[in-house]
Amino acid sequence: MKISRFLGLFLGALLVTAPSYAATIPTVLVGNGGNAGDVQSNGTFGSVAYPYRIGKHEVTNAQYVEFLNGVDPTGANTLALYSTSMTSDARGGIIFISGAANGSKYSVKAGRDNNPVVFVSWYDSIRFANWMHNGMGSGDTENGAYTLQGGTPTPASGHSITRNPGAKWWLPSEDEWYKAAYHKNDGATGNYWDYPTSTDAEPLSDQPPGSDAPDLSNTGNLRKYDGVANGYDDGFAVTGSASFNSSQNYLTNVAAYTSALSPYGTFDQGGNVFEWNEALISANLRGVRGGSWHGGSFNVHASNRSFGGPAVGSSIIGFRVATIPEPATTCLGALGMVVILSWRRRKS
């Protein structure tokens, strides 16, 4: 019992003091299983029969760089997990250096660690989920939570890919994503907010954390222009201008709007970037939700259902992942595995 208690305390500390090379995905619990769905003009969404955990934040550049260096250490990029737009576009946050040592070919642009990763396709997002499912490091990208056939950037029969039984990490279904964003977290009910900031009031646009806006809890990274000199709703949230500048980074760090949370405690499900989900809209389209830095508040409304080509990345689309309902934070660095194996040998 004492050894077990010590191990639990040690591993708990390990989650907090994780080595910098270990991807850490903080999650929140989405309970109230069996809740009713929310009826919208384009369908009924948000009913989920089981508890699950969903990423508290969008997947960041730093997390995606670890993924790239783990699964593509030589920089061959045979699966096109890296897009040159990640480097060339002002919204991209990742650099490729061909002369760097194997396992270090990819790095984050200065100051962009906690921006959401963009220019990721739907296939990139489920390959990231497979990597998480398989323990990270050099984990397999083609099998696990999803099965991708052909070893090519666009898998054979890509339109038929669905989540495999026993998935440990995955891309949220549309219902899972919708529930985490809009359900009121008030039991197994059919009660939903219109916006993922726990309100029916239209969100405001302002630089984070939204100090110039009258309600920090309902402010986000979106484009809204009211033509009034009031310090907010002046266009793009980051610049406070209605004019677009191609050399400007319009992304904000995940959780930069510190008071604007969904009822379950997620950040940025309204604004910053649209997020991929599992929905198969048609043979050539997959679901995205949540609005972005480029769109207005109508994009973050619960009624807005969007989509994109699964092989195409964009400066306005990222993703978050989901997992089984434990633990609150998962960190599977090599050090953690050494500790566990060492303890098992001593015990035996």
Image (cartoon, helix red, strand yellow):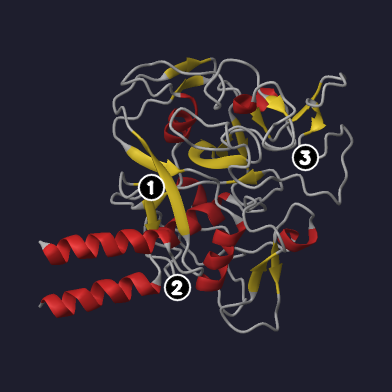
Residue that label 1 marks: 163
**Residues packed near mark 2 inside 10 Å, few (<14), some (14 to 19) or many (20 plus):** some
Q: Earlier in the sequence, mark 3 or mark 2?
A: 2
Q: Amino acid at mark 2?
A: Ser
* Residue contact between numbered discs 3 and 1, judged by CB atoms under 8 Å: no
Q: Is residue 256 above or below residue 125?
A: above
Residue that label 2 marks: 138
Quadrant (top left, top right, bottom left, bottom right) of the N terminus: bottom left
What is the spatial separation of the Cα atoms under label 3 and label 1, in whole angstroms?
A: 36 Å
Residue 7 found in image quarter: bottom left
Tell us which disc is closer to us: 3 or 2. Answer: 3
Q: Earlier in the sequence, mark 1 or mark 2?
A: 2
Residue at the image position 38 percent from the left and 16 percent from the top: 190
| Image location (x, y in percent) of residue 8 | 24, 60
Residue that label 3 marks: 238
Tell us which disc is closer to us: 3 or 1. Answer: 3
Residue 211 found in image quarter: top right
**Residues packed near mark 1 inside 10 Å, few (<14), some (14 to 19) or many (20 plus):** some
| Image location (x, y in percent) of residue 219 | 66, 28
**Residues packed near mark 3 inside 10 Å, few (<14), some (14 to 19) or many (20 plus):** many
Q: Amino acid at mark 3?
A: Val
**What element does badge 3 sit on?**
loop
Q: Is residue 19 above or below residue 8?
A: below
Q: Is residue 5 above or below residue 324?
A: below
In the depicted view, which residue is nearer to us: 31 or 346? 346
Tell us which disc is closer to us: 1 or 2. Answer: 2
**What element does badge 2 sit on?**
loop
